[in-house]
């Protein structure tokens, strides 16, 4: 039988072989888990299958590129715990990953929002993430373009990074461990062969219609927007997962440079699955605003909805009053994988589980991996490998 070359530059599957671990999805989380596995043991023969022609082409690269502090989620949630771990890992690797710890202000414009900031500040002490209130006078001196009417909560451990820089680092670690990457390859079916305790994955490359079969001991579903579709290939119908998609449009700023030095966030709107239209910076200092929140049925349409620009301008004017519409333009959009739709007003944590209870051992599902997924990626990989794959 022909052998699958242990070659990181592999671009298509050319024959079927066995792998100890197969990761479906080459986004930042899939790359992080792959890197963790190959660094853990030389006996791990790991394959990442990615349907696009390059890794990280979807949710992983279409976001704010913020290194989140870990403030916004319930203190015992996976989102909080893994975000904090992942944040620290990114900063610890600043020699290899482009990152700037610029900090973030969360702005309160009324008494209700002030109460929200006080609760957030109290929670930050419980989870050991530093925050501090700064005076409105100091705020005006430090950021004269920003309007804060009631209070400013500073989050000094928030930062900005390059999504591609993070993924390039993880891809390099995966390559150093002789991991296998199959780009341009779609998973079209999965079967558990109970007598052999292995999974057979049916795949098809983008170059031809031939089906290739891969046998693997473990499957880790990191398919992001398509993770429910992959999960439903093995889940019984009564346990099928419905996918929801939340599109976020981002807008660039091309006006006079206001010399803003940090990220600026409004207080979140209660009951809305978004942190609001915030001001972020890229590593070059370019200002952008977003994301907004738009529920969509199609996860393949990344065209920016220019109809949302007026609403974005009004949202930004609350804390950046001198903004003018003519200085803002549609830039890009991203789509967040959701497990609950707009009618459900509750917190949804990351879902990370082994499907052994339904007769599929060593099938690890990662579902609803949205923000703060980029920040949390190395925290997620450590958690998955230690809990399920060690």
Image (cartoon, rainbow, N blue to C red):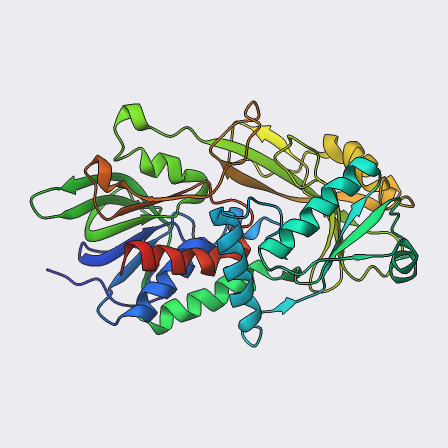
- Residue occupying image coordinates x 20% and y 52%: 216
Q: Is residue 14 left or right of residue 306?
A: left
Asked if residue 189 is positioned above or below residue 50 in the image, the reply reads above
Q: Is residue 298 above or below residue 121?
A: above
Residue 182 visible? The answer is no
Which of the 4 image quadrants contains residue 386?
Answer: bottom left
Residue 127 at least partly seen: yes
Front one among 208 and 353: 353
Which residue appears at 11% of the width and 42% of the height? 194
Q: How many marks?
A: 0
- The quadrant the C terminus occupies is bottom left
Q: Position of residue 313 (x, y in %)?
A: 82, 38
Give the residue at x 32% y 55%: 387
Q: Nearer the viewer, residue 141 or 260?
A: 141
Q: Is residue 85 above or below residue 118?
A: below
> What is the quadrant of the N terminus in the image?
bottom left
Side of 190 where 27 appears, left or right: right
Residue 108 at what x, y percent from top left?
80, 44
Question: Is 218 situated left or right of 335 in this image?
Answer: left
């Amino acid at each position: 039988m022909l052998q699958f070359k242990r070659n990181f530059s592999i671009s298509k599957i050319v024959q079927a072989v066995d792998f100890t671990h197969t990761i479906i999805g080459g986004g930042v989380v899939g790359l992080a888990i792959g890197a963790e596995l190959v660094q853990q043991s030389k006996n791990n023969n790991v394959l990442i299958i990615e349907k696009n022609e390059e890794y990280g082409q979807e949710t992983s690269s279409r976001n704010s590129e913020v290194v989140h502090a870990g403030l916004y989620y319930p203190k015992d949630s996976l989102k909080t715990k893994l975000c904090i771990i992942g944040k620290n890992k990114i900063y610890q690797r600043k020699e290899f990953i482009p990152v700037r710890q610029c900090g973030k202000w969360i702005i309160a414009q009324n008494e209700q929002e002030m109460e929200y900031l006080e609760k957030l500040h109290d929670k930050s002490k419980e989870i050991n993430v530093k925050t501090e209130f700064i005076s409105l006078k100091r705020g005006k001196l430090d950021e004269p373009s920003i309007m804060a009417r009631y209070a400013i909560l500073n989050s000094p451990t928030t930062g900005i990074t390059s999504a591609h820089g993070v993924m390039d680092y993880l891809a390099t670690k995966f390559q150093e461990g002789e991991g296998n990457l199959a780009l341009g390859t779609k998973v079209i079916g999965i079967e558990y062969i109970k007598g052999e305790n292995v999974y057979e994955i049916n795949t098809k490359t983008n170059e031809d219609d031939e089906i290739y079969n891969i046998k693997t001991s473990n499957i880790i579903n990191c398919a992001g927007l398509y993770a429910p579709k992959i999960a439903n290939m093995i889940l019984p119908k009564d346990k099928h997962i419905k996918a929801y998609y939340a599109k976020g449009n981002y807008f660039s700023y091309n006006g006079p440079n206001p010399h803003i030095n940090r990220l600026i966030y409004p207080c979140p709107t209660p009951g809305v699955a978004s942190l609001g239209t915030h001001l972020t910076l890229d590593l070059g200092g370019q200002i952008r605003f977003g994301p907004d929140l738009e529920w969509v049925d199609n996860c393949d349409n990344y065209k920016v909805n220019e109809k949302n620009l007026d609403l974005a301008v009004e949202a930004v004017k609350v804390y950046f009053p001198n903004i003018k519409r003519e200085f803002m333009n549609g830039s890009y959009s991203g789509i967040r994988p959701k497990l609950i739709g707009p009618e459900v007003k509750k917190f949804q944590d990351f879902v990370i589980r082994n499907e052994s209870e339904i007769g599929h051992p060593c099938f690890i599902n990662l579902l609803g991996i949205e923000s703060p997924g980029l920040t949390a990626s190395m925290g997620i990989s450590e958690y998955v490998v230690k809990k399920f794959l060690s």
